[in-house]
Amino acid sequence: MVLRDRFKGKISAGAMEFLNSLRVDREMIMEDIWLNQAHVIMLERQGIVPREDAAKILSALDDLKAEAMAGGFQLKEELEDVHMNVESYVTEKAGQAGGKMHTARSRNDQVVTDVRMKLRGEILETVGLLITLDRTLLKLAEKSKSTVMPGYTHLQHAQPITLGFWASSYAEMFFRDIERMLGSYSRVNSSPLGACALSGTSFPIDRKFTARLLGFDSLQENALDAVSSRDFILESLSSLAILTSNLSRLSEELVLWSTEEFSLIEMPDEFSAGSSIMPQKKNPDLAELIRGSAGRTYGNLVQALTAVKGITSGYNRDLQEDRALLWDSFRVVNSSVEIMNGILAGVKWNDKRMFALVEDGFSCATELANSLVMKEGMPFRKAHSVTGKLVKSLIKEGKNFKDISDVRKLLKKEGIELSEKDLRNLLDPSKAVSASRSIGGTSPAEVGRVAKSLKKELLVKEKSLKGKRKGIEDAGKETEKLVREIV
Amino acid sequence: MVLRDRFKGKISAGAMEFLNSLRVDREMIMEDIWLNQAHVIMLERQGIVPREDAAKILSALDDLKAEAMAGGFQLKEELEDVHMNVESYVTEKAGQAGGKMHTARSRNDQVVTDVRMKLRGEILETVGLLITLDRTLLKLAEKSKSTVMPGYTHLQHAQPITLGFWASSYAEMFFRDIERMLGSYSRVNSSPLGACALSGTSFPIDRKFTARLLGFDSLQENALDAVSSRDFILESLSSLAILTSNLSRLSEELVLWSTEEFSLIEMPDEFSAGSSIMPQKKNPDLAELIRGSAGRTYGNLVQALTAVKGITSGYNRDLQEDRALLWDSFRVVNSSVEIMNGILAGVKWNDKRMFALVEDGFSCATELANSLVMKEGMPFRKAHSVTGKLVKSLIKEGKNFKDISDVRKLLKKEGIELSEKDLRNLLDPSKAVSASRSIGGTSPAEVGRVAKSLKKELLVKEKSLKGKRKGIEDAGKETEKLVREIV
Amino acid sequence: MVLRDRFKGKISAGAMEFLNSLRVDREMIMEDIWLNQAHVIMLERQGIVPREDAAKILSALDDLKAEAMAGGFQLKEELEDVHMNVESYVTEKAGQAGGKMHTARSRNDQVVTDVRMKLRGEILETVGLLITLDRTLLKLAEKSKSTVMPGYTHLQHAQPITLGFWASSYAEMFFRDIERMLGSYSRVNSSPLGACALSGTSFPIDRKFTARLLGFDSLQENALDAVSSRDFILESLSSLAILTSNLSRLSEELVLWSTEEFSLIEMPDEFSAGSSIMPQKKNPDLAELIRGSAGRTYGNLVQALTAVKGITSGYNRDLQEDRALLWDSFRVVNSSVEIMNGILAGVKWNDKRMFALVEDGFSCATELANSLVMKEGMPFRKAHSVTGKLVKSLIKEGKNFKDISDVRKLLKKEGIELSEKDLRNLLDPSKAVSASRSIGGTSPAEVGRVAKSLKKELLVKEKSLKGKRKGIEDAGKETEKLVREIV
Amino acid sequence: MVLRDRFKGKISAGAMEFLNSLRVDREMIMEDIWLNQAHVIMLERQGIVPREDAAKILSALDDLKAEAMAGGFQLKEELEDVHMNVESYVTEKAGQAGGKMHTARSRNDQVVTDVRMKLRGEILETVGLLITLDRTLLKLAEKSKSTVMPGYTHLQHAQPITLGFWASSYAEMFFRDIERMLGSYSRVNSSPLGACALSGTSFPIDRKFTARLLGFDSLQENALDAVSSRDFILESLSSLAILTSNLSRLSEELVLWSTEEFSLIEMPDEFSAGSSIMPQKKNPDLAELIRGSAGRTYGNLVQALTAVKGITSGYNRDLQEDRALLWDSFRVVNSSVEIMNGILAGVKWNDKRMFALVEDGFSCATELANSLVMKEGMPFRKAHSVTGKLVKSLIKEGKNFKDISDVRKLLKKEGIELSEKDLRNLLDPSKAVSASRSIGGTSPAEVGRVAKSLKKELLVKEKSLKGKRKGIEDAGKETEKLVREIV
């Protein structure tokens, strides 16, 4: 990005290193090669670059692509960015013709085109991983739709739920993450190429043609907007931050449930770690790292938001780090989703402990209050109050809802007569769970229905994902075909 | 939210104030009344509450609504939240029947339903304001599509553009903000009512019916997800943060352009402020406040992201502040958009200064280099280098591109012969601007075409906005009609 | 802040509300009155304002102060900020003399002086509350220095510790928060008054005198820095954010420990809440709110950091919100510290459950490994490995360290002979705890020593706090005395 | 960190990579070697490890140190962290004796000790760079204490100031950054070694001795606090974020001042960049990168704050990334400070333009109003109003303060008679500047005095810096000496 013919001074070494963006853009080399191919094919077609020059450039790009794919291409630090590395390689191979490759474009539109090409791939990758995670959760939901466990609010036992119900709540959350990522896709997969430095160009370029060759769905029209705007990056970083907020909640629950005290699950060995000093330990390090990764995506989002705050339109160098943040957030998120999937697939669920926790407590209090309303016609607030007093008395006597006769006695004092059989039914956690038949409730029937419906919706998303992938691949093939026609 | 029959202690005063959420939820009273109406109509329809009790409750709600609309309803601090205030009012008026209003629901689903109802309104409000702002920008774009001004990158003169081109770049940005807000709408306008505390209920409720009466487009099915998830809030806060990042960039430019040194614009008096000690000043305080409001929405987003990080599923009290953040961000954003619209409508654009800045500099250097490529067949890199040297020499001699004969002489030295007429054409900013005819380029023709096309797309968004508003109004009318049938 | 003689237009209503800073500065009225008194006394002393005018102004300020303290002074919205309200009141009462009060100063230095005066008070308030909290923790530390409980890493049982040891770890954390707050004090309590708009003044003012009257310890010398810089605000917001990060960790532990599953503590009733639908619940709402308050202080810090990013020197309106953030963060933090103190003072610690959790597990594994090193001369890594195998075998057989004979048998297989008595000693949690006698270790002796030493250090901090408070009070008295001399 | 004797499963590859902390801790190898040396010397002295074993270990560490310094030591990815790499190297060389190195400590205290050792060095490095930057600013302050330029508020011309005054305002800001960094030093340079996993140890270790050998000033006493707390990291990250907020403001001003429109400065060539498409440009890329680096340090701070929010005490894996953030923030800040120093030393200040901007405007309006107060006895508010009207009239007529006779005529209309000579004096920017003689005002005399005083304070800070550096070096020498006695 530094062409310094008019400068007499020399840039200092420290400054050079700071300016150097190879660190952040070396991952975009394949995108940059493809972009160069499409651009040169267009320049030739429009008569801006003669066919023989185009052939030389494309041939050089062929060599570079082969080297890069074989891992043999060494980027030179002194050329500062991946774009200058590619251009320098081409100029060396193609001679004077190489100097024509950068006609009718600028580093400004080139960089942001590369970023969008790589970003769309990352989004699709994450969506794919989320679909897998969601299927794992729905499989669990169906398998354990009748496994009774305590439902918590404020981490206190609230009402009995099923493990399957819990699993499908996360499936719904991650499904919205999928929606969000796909929803942002159309704002990402739009071509800025041809915006040039900031104002378009007087060369008779064909922006729609390059957009098609590069697999874009639309054009970023206004050129100044195309090179200045980074809201598409902020949007992706936000989506990833929100996704990790969901992941961190799931991680927290797994960390908690794998404690000695909860003992609701056993973490799979391959996703745990030992201790250097305490041989008896099995630490949920990976779940903790996933929980911590929320901090990473939050921090990346804040960095990007801060960088764009208050800068003027047109490219400013403050924007350089944006892409580094993107790739970092995606790397962390993709690892996290993959590992979370592995953890969920490998966890041992302690059904007995789950049931015991419900049975030995007061989780069925709401069900009891509801029944007083439905069967005794008591106003809800009154039923609530009576049940509250009952629980208080039981705790005082060291009893719980398993002590049916005590419950019966205490209710009688409040003027409520219930047979032991009725009470037993009311306070049976499995029955309470089955009774929650409202739409989306915890009853096995509803859990099964919701899971089935969500699986269908996942199929739709997967189809959309595949369509997008195919569009990109087809564009790649078309470019390749046109290269072959010229070279 | 504190019903304390089983507790012997008294909550401390300091703690009480901290727990008190009236501050954050008093703005949702109209939503809460509507929700209660719909819920009671449904309870009656499903046979859960007798018609006469329903009539008493609905009648009390009628009174409350009238008082609240007239501004006469005083919320009691000691009742802690708006929901208890409403319930307490109803119980007072409707007697024992009032105690039945809270049947088959919980504070958990009630709060989040209110939030979603209010939030959808806020989103539509912001979208409406953005459509207005975009139209103001497009009007400016069309009016000044031929007004030449310097285009900046790195705040340095880069190439000549037009004011209309600049305006339409912001129109495109804010259009994406509109898309983002509307894109999130379906994840907001979905009913959690009936999820109850966390697991649904055994009462035979009809969730679809209440959803329809409240104007929701769909159901949040899984009950645990419905009461635990706040990603819809994070998504709105993100969208607002991104929007203010765009607004702050526009503000920064206006602040800059209104300096003595730039003098590209004069701020409208009604959006400026004076100084207590310096009588000559006219300060762009409102643009600065808008620029600063990015901090506010960023901070609110970070607060919400932090609060949900690592908490377990089921309601936790950490979530209480989420809605305060929402209303605060919307208030700031809506004011900012409205004021920005006023500023843009009132600014005086200094066309002469704009043109002079272009003419007296080297903004047309790219156009000259392009011409060397197109007409002389010079490789781009070479043309770039020759032009760079030319500029260097001119600066040294204290000249610029207006000094045509000097330019000609210097080019000659490099072996390039151009007639004075050709040069004059090449270095005429208006002609340079007209030449940038690539799609989305700065030429008046393209600026006009893009503006027209964007205006059409705005009509589509406006139609969608109106449709959503009507849906909500119709639902309100249906509820009202059913209330009348019972009362 | 808006004096608009040279403007012809009218500021719009929406803009006016946005500009209005009463919301953020009404809390500084007492500081503003004091500032005005000191400033006028100085102006009179320096011969800038005649004594009779000074007397009129000071007398008007007397009236205002009385009204404000009695709660009778109504700020007028249309005067936009607290400073104009005060000035307007004085001008009304003192006639033309009132117009002289604003001589030789500006809104810019006035605002930041008020902020610093209020801020120093907030810092001292928080430090005082933290000293109280620390004493509560140290009292607990001493009382329960022998109460054995599981020590956790990764939330897994690691080694036995004592409750007192745990309490004193938090005492040390909050002690550093005290240090940080006091460490920032000298950068806060420094007078910017006399910096005027940005460049000082040609009036012969005496900055040192006003600084003394207002209780400042030093001067912010360079005037431009004095009105532009907000790093003292960022520093306070950072300290509060760090403090809440510590508080949120403590809250998380208390929330966890009060679950049915952990049952290590019972939350005091007065700091818990009930549920609207689940009568048996006792929710740790206040601990959750404290945990969530980390989000609030983080968000406020981010907002302030964002606002100052990239703005130029000299006052800019972006800075208006800074003080609102300050008072909000202090309010949240002070409530949180006070409530946390109440919670800790009221919690019931379940000693039996704590001991049982240690005894029934493998917490003493490290102690066993250490002993193999010390007594058997085994390299640590080897001892670690042997102990690990032992634990694995015991778990397989459903045994733990209470099953001494099984342990003995299994160790024998590895070639290690230990008498049952020795083993019993080694695996006795109380003895393990007592053995950790390294400095700062969990042994009761060390916990006691550390607590004692920390209490001494708290006395030193308290003395410093009292000295600072007295300095401010004395300055107030001196001002009052000089006012009386003139009026 | 993974010792897995009791696990039957295999950790998955993806998980392994995620767990791998080499990336974040490879920079701490020299600290880790030193720590190991000190620990082993102590173990030998306390009779915990026999002298011959200690000699073997220390000898292996000698070899490793030599290899590492020569750059020949390759860290093995599969060993996950730097600590296991060091231990594995030692065990290989020292045989069974190597297994004793990890006696009486844990990875938990080891990591945090390494971090503190490296961090203290980073703090001192930054302080040193800030002292240099401050001296550059003060040199500029003294050299240009009489160079008149416009002083801005709201980016509008406010009052005339001097360039030296501006420079010394930044010198004061960065001086506070120095204070903050040094103020946090005592909370950083405190030894956690010996805290072991979380509870100290029963081995008879000597924590004070290792602390001395490692150059620590004190002990982190409570062991649980020592391994759990990360507030010292948050404090450093906060200080760096605040520092970059100051740097970004300075950068913004330099970017602005180097625009064609301002033309107050010319950026040094070696800290500028060209453009790939616009040959005439000289872009302030480095100042922009520094401005953008605020985002980086803010983001890192948010990540760290988020990671610690709500985690329980004792080590949790979430904390792994903290050190990566530290080194990243320091790298960015240190580069930024160094480059800013280079920029300031190389900038050409355009004195003529600065003066012209003041002379051609109304910057002296305040001075005029002040004089009406001082000489005519007019109340300030009235003088303000009169001057405001005057400016308004002048602007209307296209005049400014250089048009003395117009000014005189207009004042006369308001009843104010001033001789042309008096007016000329009043409106002479240089005289206005010299008149601002209040403490810290913009008069050359005050700028000179403040600069001199700040230079003295810098000497004190430098002495403190050197003292700290020497303390660390001496500790290193003592360790080395004791190693030689054993090996």
Image (cartoon, coloured by chain):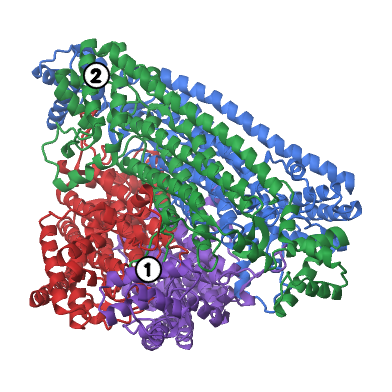
Chain colours: A red, B purple, C blue, D green
Compute the Cα span from label 1 to label 2: 62 Å
Which residue position is annotated with label 1?
A: B388
Farthest right residue? C52
- Residue B38 point in image, percent of width and height: 41, 75
Residue A163 in the image: above or below residue A310 = above
Dot 2 crowding, Cα within 10 Å, few <14, some 14–19, many 20+: many
Q: In which quarter of the image is residue D320?
A: top left
Residue C122 in the image: above or below residue D191 = below
Identify which residue is drawn at 44% across, 24% down.
Answer: D471
**Residue type (three-letter) at the residue carrying disc 2:** Leu
Horizontal arrangement in the rendering, residue C49 relative to residue A243 (left or right): right
Q: Quadrant of residue B48?
A: bottom left
- Residue A66 point in image, percent of width and height: 10, 61
Which residue position is annotated with label 2?
A: D58
Horizontal arrangement in the rendering, residue D347 relative to residue B420 (left or right): right
Residue A388 in the image: above or below residue B267 = above
Q: In which quarter of the image is the N terminus of chain D?
A: top left
- Residue C223 point in image, percent of width and height: 66, 50
Identify which residue is drawn at 48% across, 71% down.
Answer: B250
